[in-house]
Image (spheres, rainbow, N blue to C red):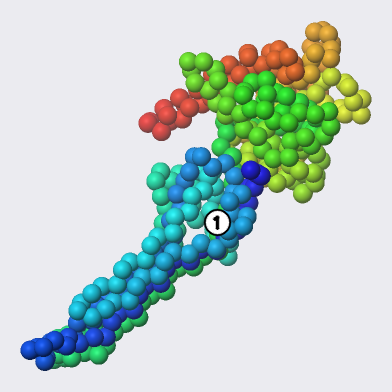
Amino acid sequence: MKFVDEARINIYAGNGGNGCLSFLREKYRPKGGPDGGDGGRGGDVILVPDTGLNTLADFRFTRKYKAKNGESGAGKDRFGKHGEDCIIRMPTATIVTDDYTGEVIVDMSTVKDQFVIARGGDGGLGNARFKSSTNQAPRRITDGKAGAELTLTLELRVLADVGLLGLPNAGKSTFLRAVSHARPKVANYPFTTLYPELGVVDVGERGGFVVADIPGLIEGAAQGAGLGIRFLKHLLRTRLLLHIVDISGFDPEIDPVESIRSIQNELAAFGHELNELPQWLVFNKCDFLSEQQAQDSGQRILRELDWQGPHYWVSAINGEGCKLLTHHIDEWLLEQMTAKENSDNS
């Protein structure tokens, strides 16, 4: 199924049914009185998180979702039937926003069971409701209320612990293949990754974590250049960014130091404090160089960047260095989780 991470839909809750104007007419009961029943309540529009969905493709063609209207009341004090609810299933990583105000209504990742996003209208009152000692034959009823209507913007943000950064052809997809069971497309040309890919990294008894590979970034991505701008938002939910750097020297026009600075500038330009997430450097394609050359190249980059954070040398094509890196990531994530739990409990 084609990956779709944005959609716009219109939702309509059901209208309430009208109250009934009726008087009892039975043999031997000439003055039976008012017996008009109330209208039924309109159906709600309900959002349900579904862990089995990972794209908004279902919303490309179905744009309108409407709950059933409540039925009108009837004589003999019969209430109208309530309208059937409209259930909309969507990925758990979906952000639902009011298209008119821009206000975020709900983050589906925080919803455990379901979320009523549009309430159906209340049913109207039948004339039996208005009978009193001074008004034995009321002819008054009320109409059902209209259900809520909304235009929603749906935005999918993948849920991952670790996000991969890097220029096109830096080897992010190869790295994802090396550390997980994901099988993204790998080829010797830029932009082979056209949409986010997720991979689960298994680290044995301690569990594992999820890695997200997004399309390669180029200069100007935060302003719309290339493919990365559309998917930068997927990194907002990650806890750690791995910056994959090609140090093979295969393309002499690419300076690793400038590529790192360029991508960091794009993160800052995108905003949302994305550039403040922890970043680790991963020097990739070391198999093109001798061990000493790879070390010298990496150390030069660290000096010019004045990099103080974690850094690793790997060869994603043959998996060299990847296992050590994934175990260190898992340990770091566990430390972060423990620290957060201790902070919440204090």
Q: Which of these two is toward me, 300 or 62?
A: 62
Q: Residue at x 71, y 12 (%)?
A: 320
Q: Quadrant of residue 300?
A: top right
Callout 1: few (<14), some (14-19), or many (20+) C-alpha neighbours within 10 Å? many
Percent of width and height locating residue 116: 41, 57
Percent of width and height locating residue 226: 79, 44
Q: Which of these two is toward me, 53 or 23?
A: 23
- For the view shown, which residue lies furthest in the front direction? 27
Q: Is mark 1 on a helix, strand or loop?
A: strand
- For the view shown, which residue lies furthest in the left direction? 28
Q: Which amino acid does label 1 sit on?
A: Thr
Q: Which residue is drawn at 48% across and 43% down?
A: 50
Left/right of residue 38 with respect to residue 150 in the rendered view: left
Percent of width and height locating residue 44: 40, 62
- Residue identified by numbered label 1: 97
Q: Which residue is drawn at 82% across and 20% down?
A: 247
